[in-house]
Amino acid sequence: MPNLQNKTAVITGAAAGLGRHLARRFAHEGAHVIVGDRRPSDETVARIERDGGRAEQLTVDVADEASVRAFASNVRALHDRGIDILVNNAGLNGDPHLVAERPLADWERTLRVNLTGTMLVTRELLPALTAGDGGCVLNVASNVAKRGLPYRADYVASKWGLLGLTQTLALELAPQNVRVNAVCPGPIDGDRVEQLLQAHADAEGRPLEEMRRDWAEAAPMKRFITPEEVASVAVFLCGPGSSAMTGQALNVTGGFIMS
């Protein structure tokens, strides 16, 4: 039997990229998926339905409190018995700058989406998560939630903060039978990492191919991570196999981060 049979899962930032892979994998595992994104999610929903899964899309801008409240209200209207899973995946890469040159607006925007947005979505969906027998929250963090990275202070700070939020929520929600964990991927193969590599190459004045090689070879496994590998760990953290785990942050980094 699929790991998430008859579960209802809300996944933010699921219109494309890793979020789309997560939504498709969760649907494949039997979940009824609510795709949340500020952009149209027609393609994600269409792929899920083409694969025989169930999905709906709702619009949300996680950085806007009113939008998040409306999103949560719409989720509850669709599933008045509550939801089982929330995956906070929506996030920004931010623009590479040294701290000495970082615009305040860039810093605040990244933290607003990555950290405050996760808090807002979780806060507003808690009544739906606690309406049944319990549930789980999965926050998509990063390998840089456990290390520094030059030129990325806004992103790094947001992801370190996300792990603190994960552990705090785990403590607060354990009495309500809601588990809260995080996944910390390394660079994920795809369009987003290519855009980021180019931005770093431009900011650091280095050739793109050199940047790509250095990032890939930094991990003992000498490669980037695939979205499917992250999705497999996400399913585990939201499924019955991790029933005794809360407040954890699992690395999916090809061995680059081991603690």
Image (tube, helix red, strand yellow):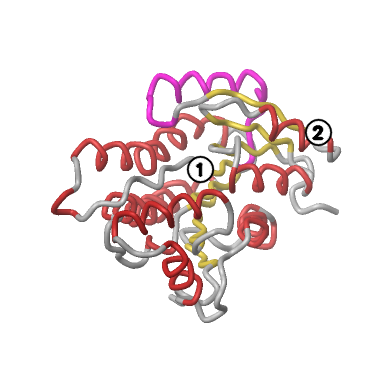
Label 2: state its secondary structure. Answer: helix
Q: State the residue position of label 2.
A: 49
Label 1: state its secondary structure. Answer: strand
Give the residue drawn at x 45%, y 54%.
141
Residue 237 in the figure: left or right of residue 256: right
Viewer-side residue, 236 vs 23: 23
Region in magenta: 62-85
Give the residue drawn at x 72%, y 31%.
45
Viewer-side residue, 76 vs 23: 23
Q: Which mark is residue 88?
A: 1
Q: In the figure, residue 221 lies in which quadrant?
A: bottom right
Viewer-side residue, 98 vs 236: 98
Instruction: Give yes or no for residue 77 being in the magenta stretch.
Output: yes
Please determine whether, in this image, residue 1 is positioned above or below residue 105: below
Label 2 neighbour load within 10 Å: few <14, some 14-19, many 20+ = some
Please determine whether, in this image, residue 22 is positioned above or below residue 144: above
Which mark's residue is nearer the viewer, 1 or 2?
2
Q: Position of residue 175 (x, y in %)?
A: 49, 48
Q: Position of residue 245 (x, y in %)?
A: 55, 62
Between the C-alphas of marks 1 and 2, the distance is 22 Å
Q: Position of residue 96 (x, y in %)?
A: 30, 51
Give the mark, 1 or 2, whose residue is nearer the N terminus.
Answer: 2
The amino acid sitting under disc 1 is Asn
Residue 197 in the figure: left or right of residue 105: right
Label 1 neighbour load within 10 Å: few <14, some 14-19, many 20+ = many
